[in-house]
Image: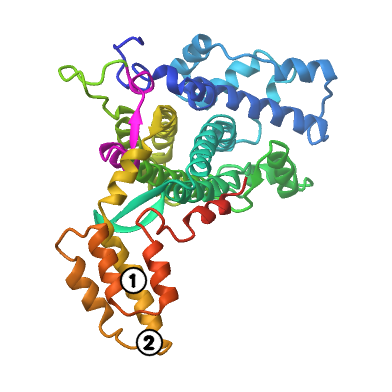
Amino acid sequence: MAVMSTLSPLDGRYASYVSPLVDHLSEDALNRARVTVEVEWLIYLVDTGILPGEFTPEERDEMRSIEVDPKELGEIEAETRHDVKAVEYYLRKRVKYPDIVHILCTSEDINNLAYALTIKDAVEKVWLPAARRLVNNISALAREQRDQPMLSRTHGQTATPTTLGKEMSVFAWRLSRQLQRIRDTEYLGKINGATGTYGAHVAALPETDWPSHSRSFVESLGLSWNPLTTQIESHDWQAELYSDIARFNRILHNFATDVWTYISLGYFHQSLAAQGSTGSSTMPHKVNPIRFENAEANLEISSALLDTLGSTLVTSRLQRDLTDSSTQRNIGVAFGHSLLAIDNVTRGLAGLDVDANALARDLDASWEVLGEPIQQAMRVASIKGATGMDNPYERLKDLTRGQQVTEEIMRDFIKSLGIPADVEARLLELTPATYTGLASQLVTYLGE
């Protein structure tokens, strides 16, 4: 069990579940990324001949292997009272051309690129793989249960049957669309000086094509170049990404609440080992759906933080203010709660078994749902010239609304209609369990 003296549960109780994010979205990870950007900028300026000097391959490798000592960096920052300046001084002690370190840069030139690199890695190496595994598991359940009939409930009331697999496939499809958007995220960066004008660059080296070099450098880091900024990169891409992840969260929240409901209806049985060794502290018969409830809470917290990040980061007074500095320090927290929720749903889903008998019992107790196909068959028969098909909706309403309809009552009603023989035969073969339309076939839209 993690130490409980931490302020955040992500650093205490849930630390082991979100620890992969620490390598990308912690303060130490940010400082490592800052060092990476500073080193690459130094190498770029020398290798392109913008500034004099020369590096051997071994010297480049050595600089790119510089490790960050958090203790020493912290001591420097205690004097500078500036995090990026501390990184600059830290590097000056360790490189061949210390005077070139951080030259022609404002701190935001380094910060925006460092954040883009860390967020990109966190998404692509940690969050997306976890989310993709979960969606694949939901898709696998959909395919496995594609033919399992299930009573639908619209507005909480019995409705046209479906299949369990088709309902799972709806969520897999929705979540997959969001994953595609997140996979296609464009991570932007800039390196253009104190107000985005290359003012100092041109004053120092007027013959250099600075926009071209800015673009080349940003793209060499695997990022997309933003040509027009103030002192800060405007963070619009971050807002777009956080909106997509928040939307994924909310769809997953919907999935968690639906699965919770199916558990309460008895459609799923839970494995105690998968959900927790103790279901209830006083009621030994219970297996609480804690994985899905935990996920709901964490998805709500994550989405709220992502909404705040997205709405705050797109605004900066005039050419710069520091609201983004504090705001961005919470990116890891927002991702952490989402990752924790994904882990909970993944484990919760692995501990579910479908109770086909419970599904069958509900269907067999709900013959009123056949009022819909019978009514529609009567309407079509009337259009084709059959007589005695008047007021089909009203007749089915009188039969089904507010009262229990058994199989015998429904079949007797069908026989009393005088509907064409082929239609009557088709309706008499229909049961709530077979009235699922194309539900099973629709699962194929997930692909294999």
Q: Secondary structure at mark 2?
A: loop
The amino acid at mark 1 is Ile
Image-based side of 145 in relation to 5, left or right = right
Residue occupying image coordinates x 42% and y 40%: 324
Which quadrant of the structure image shows residue 382? Answer: bottom left
Residue nearest the observer in this picture, 192 or 385 = 385
Up the image or down, 298 lies above or below 176; here it is: above
Residue 133 pos. (x, y %): 54, 33
Is 265 part of what is drawn in magenta? yes
Q: Residues within 10 Å of mark 1 (few under 14, many from 20)?
A: many
Q: Main secondary structure of the magenta part?
A: helix
User: Local crowd at mark 2 within 10 Å, few (<14), some, or many (≥20)?
Assistant: some
Identify the secondary structure beneath mark 1. helix
In terms of image quadrants, where is residue 48?
Answer: top right
Q: Is residue 92 above or below residue 43?
A: above
**Circle 1 sits on which residue?**
374
Above-or-below relation of 167 to 388: above
- In the image, which residues are magenta? 257-276
Residue under label 2: 386
Residue 101 appears in the rendering: no
Q: Amino acid at mark 2?
A: Ala
State which tag comes first along the sequence, 1 or 2. Answer: 1
Residue plotted at (26% across, 70% down):
413
- Kindly report the distance in space between the C-alpha atoms of the residues bearing marks 1 and 2: 14 Å
